[in-house]
Amino acid sequence: LLPAALGEPGSRRRAAERALRLLAAEHRELVLGVAREHGQEALTAATAMLDADPLAQLPARMPSLPAWLDPAVLPQVLLRDRSAALPTEAVRHLCTMLAVSALGEPYPGLEIVRAACDTDSLAEFAWVLFESWQSAGSPSKDSWAFTGLGLLGDDSTARQLAPLVRAWPGESQHTRAVTGLEVLAQIGTDVALMHLYGISQKVKFRGLREQAARKVTEVADGLGLTPEQLGDRLVPDLGLDADGSLVLDYGPRRFTVGFDEQLKPYVVDGTGVRRKDLPKPGARDDATLAPAAHKRFAGLKKDVRTLAADQIRRFEAAMVTGRCWPAADFRRYFLSHPLLWHVVRRLVWATVDDAGEVGTAFRVAEDRTLADVDDETYALPDDATVTIAHPLGLGTAVPAWAEVFADYEILQPFPQLGRDVYRLEAAERGETLLQRHMGVTVPAGRLLSLERRGWRRGTPQDAGIQSWLEREVPGGRAVVIDLDPGIAVGVVDMFPDQKIEAIWVNDVPYGDWFPRGGKVRLRDLDDVTVSEVLRDLAEVTR
């Protein structure tokens, strides 16, 4: 770090200086000892660098604030105890701090501001500043008003920003959307990273989805995790009680929040009556408690709305792909999670051995104990590996499990026990082409519904035509559906009907222009993958 920190001015030097100051905070003599090995000149320069006031390190040319910015009309920035607000001149200084900052390289004074000021008012100030920048035409020279969201924003910022990021590519704003991903990562809270992970999993713009996936991988790598493991850890508890509920206090009235099989929240009042929504505060309710409780429930609904579809889709995908977890992770991230356990208890789980064979199947009871198909208590071994049981893995036990769930009136978040299963015919197993759905003409919109099940449109070819759909499957392969005439990028209804020309398996995890003879025999796919592909095809060709 020393040669970079004492070298040419620029971002590399500033990054090295920050790293050395961080080290010197605990190991100053060690840092100076290494500098001494480079000679007296290096030691003198390193000492001066460490002793320099970081607040005084400003660009040679300070930026001027834009004409569109009027601090007097922005929300007040309150002190942490909310006893007073920053005066206008101090707000101008705060804006200047943002103007000399960059994502990942904030001006050090911002940390002092964050420590001294109320976080909610800072986030509100940053959001209105961002909206003012947008109203002024989003001038690129003032983009600090956008990136400032990452330096002052909070969970509410992430909730407001994520829908814009998802929509911007469709408004010819791909670059801005990518910056939005950086902003979400910079905010860095569980809610912000949850939205970032959600974009990486599902957004209709492939370029943005891939950029988000790279950012998620970057964050996961920094934590020594896979993206899937990071996804397990990014589900916030939303302030729920340990039992997965939440009590909202209106003063004279109290309401308990619960969740159904789709993670949709509902409330139960003091008389036990279930309501779809929380009533607005009334004249007899506490003037402080009731509005705060109502605001909290509104935020909870927004977060759960984002979480629910993503998490249920993740669980279903985990069942389809056979993803497994160590028993300790199952207990920590699922069984003990205040929100996710509402989904976990509505599924059949199972242990698997090293070969992937299903051992003991079990469910989670309402008291979080485990029970087998005979409703006997089951003790999960600490060294066990756990998966979400696919009906093919449960085999003949499916009817018995379905009876258990019916007896307890347990509704499932997605088809598991009632899932249709399919198998190859004996004559199909040795083939490289799946003949049973070839030659069928299907509405383009129905085919595109497969994107909700993990299928992707192929790489655009001549004239922007996407000539195939692809689905990555285990073993580094992809199932490919060749289409005629193909889907036009951006104009999906240009060719409203699509003929399925061929269905085959590629030996890489994407489709291509390989002659339609197939590269992999159908029997080389595992039974669950075959069943899920045939289920998807049966659905769209019905």
Image: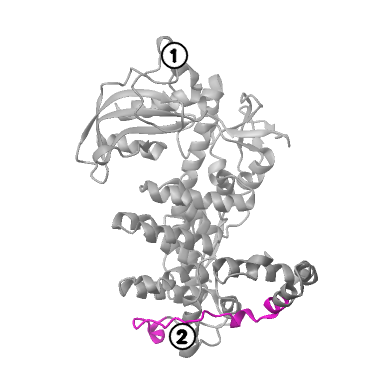
Question: In the image, 170: left or right of 232?
Answer: left
Residue 287 in the image, given as x and y percentages of width and height: 48, 77
Query: What's the magenta bit mostly, secondary-structure-wise?
Result: loop
Pick the quarter of the image with the C terminus.
top left
As helix, strand or loop, the secondary structure at mark 1 comes to loop
Q: Residue placed farthest to the top in the image?
A: 427
Residue range (magenta): 47-74
Q: Nearer the viewer, residue 504 or 540?
A: 504
Foreground disc of the pair 2, 1: 2
Judge left or right: residue 19 versus residue 157. Answer: right
For the residue carrying disc 2, how many other residues have a C-alpha within 10 Å: few (<14), some (14-19), or many (20+)? Answer: some
Mark 2 lies on a secondary structure that is helix
User: Image point 33% across, 17% down: which residue?
Assistant: 435
Q: Marks 2 and 1, how far apart in space?
A: 71 Å
The residue tagged 1 is: 429
Q: Are marks 2 and 1 in contact (CB under 8 Å)?
A: no
Front residue of 47/509: it is: 47
The amino acid on which the numbered mark 1 sits, given as a three-letter code, is Arg
Identify the residue at horizontal 38%, vertical 73% (top origin). 141
